[in-house]
Amino acid sequence: MARKTTQYVCQECGGAHLKWSGRCDACGAWNTLIEEAAPEQTPKGLGSRRGRKIAFVGLDGEPGAAPRRASGIKEFDRACGGGLVPGSALLVGGDPGIGKSTLLLQVSAALAANLSCAYISGEESIDQLRLRAKRLGLDKAPVQLAAATSVRDIAAALDDRQGPDVVVIDSIQTMFVDSLESAPGTVAQVRTSAQELIKIAKKRGFCVLLVGHVTKDGQIAGPKVLEHMVDTVLYFEGDRSHQFRILRSVKNRFGATDEIGVFEMTGAGLAEIANPSSLFLADREANVSGACVFAGIEGTRPLLVEIQALTASTTFAAPRRAVVGWDSGRLAMILAVLESRSGLVLGNSDVYLNVAGGLRITEPAADLTVAAALASSASGVPVAAGTVVFGEVGLSGEVRVVAQMDARLKEAGKLGFTNAIIPKMPGKRRRDKLTGGLEIREILHLSDLLALLRPTAGGGRRSGKQGQRSMDHPSREGASHG
């Protein structure tokens, strides 16, 4: 009988090593090598058993439309691309306590009205699941519950023609395959457990929703191949001290990526937010310097959110740059462009930037809004009430056109905004072609924006109605491209 050998597997990249070391040679991560049993050696080649020939078909066939299983929770269905596709696998990740289990229990209860749903938990007992369902008012929903961690046992229960239509696994890091000697949560266990569950889901045609833990860096724990194995990856974002939650699609084989669903955490669970723009702007104060409204696009949904900036003089040699909800590297770029191309010097000031409502913005169209908020804070001149701003800023200070401008302006018009500062349209396209009913001001360069937010001579830093009058009646220099 051959002696069993061990190997050391990196928990970041899955690389195998013959002996332990502090640093993985494959990915460079430190203290990630865990001892595991080495797999049995197999003969070289494919062996003596011949494979079956596969059949090839052409591209001109008629594709079958993938049916959708809508849960009735519109924000969840939107993030999934319109509902669940039979035989698909979804991975839902998020910080601890953000509400992943609560969301999937509500989804299971909603789907159970028309489909057979099973909720399998490896972290909670049956009684704990029932207590949560009772708190959410879902204790009467016909959801089948189970507490198990063995993939072999779960596969035996699901590999049946009369099996459930939707299965929730909470969580994939607690599952284990008994043929592997490594502990649950390791790279090998997570990869193999997900592979077995997805294989059964494809075979039987049910939807499997996997809950995934995240690391301290915000990435889903386990091998990166886990995200490649599933059909859809959803991240549940938000601050636990804040009531808003964002369900963001970062991968979807059956729908659009970067689609979001917005929820509010309440005592009775997660409530849908039908119009998130009005909610994010609900507590906004008018005529305050350093605040500007951004008209963004999240997936296919236009979304308005307020960006706040604060500049304060400092005596330290290295001013502080604090960012919440935006990329700190992009803020440094905007500050450099403002100083080099437009003459707005903020090198001796602390800069604080915040996206109100707990939303995280990633698209470059927010560059012009951030620049307007910074210039408004530095000059003390508020951006005029009822104004939205969007546009991408280049390194030479030019303002570039962004995608879906019509949809952004339409959403702003619906919420009562009357003015918009946007990039100058290319070619001979007329302003009246843009929808929304807003008064459009087009600019070519950041200097045009700063001219709108420049204090009047002798007035110094202004605020309130004085600042608004300065914005409503800009200098001739700022209106040259309008």
Image (tube, rainbow, N blue to C red):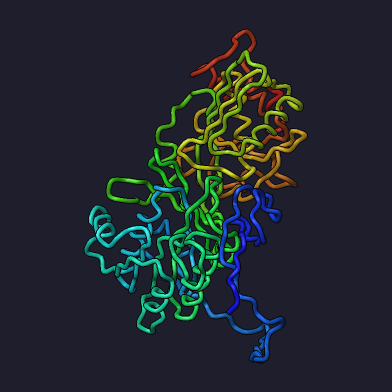
Residue 342 occupies quadrant: top right
Please, is residue 48 above or below residue 313 in the view?
below
Q: Nearer the viewer, residue 67 or 235?
A: 235
How many tags in the picture?
0
Can residue 60 be spotted in the picture?
Answer: yes
Please, is residue 170 above or below residue 448 in the view?
below
Q: Residue at x 28, y 46 (%)?
A: 267
Q: Quadrant of the C terminus?
A: top right
Measured as percent of width and height from the top left, residue 178 is found at: 46, 71
Please, is residue 433 above or below residue 280 in the view?
below
Q: Residue at x 33, y 65 (%)?
A: 147
Measured as percent of width and height from the top left, residue 116 is found at: 33, 74
Is residue 205 rendered to the left or right of residue 458? Answer: left
Q: Quadrant of the N terminus?
A: bottom right
Q: Residue at x 55, y 54 (%)?
A: 258
Q: Residue at x 55, y 42 (%)?
A: 295
Please, is residue 350 above or below residue 417 in the view?
above
Is residue 160 rendered to the left or right of residue 47? Answer: left
From this viewpoint, which residue is outermost toward the top? 458
Can residue 260 be spotted in the picture?
Answer: no
Residue 365 occupies quadrant: top right
Q: Nearer the viewer, residue 60 or 34?
A: 34
Measured as percent of width and height from the top left, residue 299 is found at: 55, 54
Measured as percent of width and height from the top left, residue 155 is found at: 42, 76
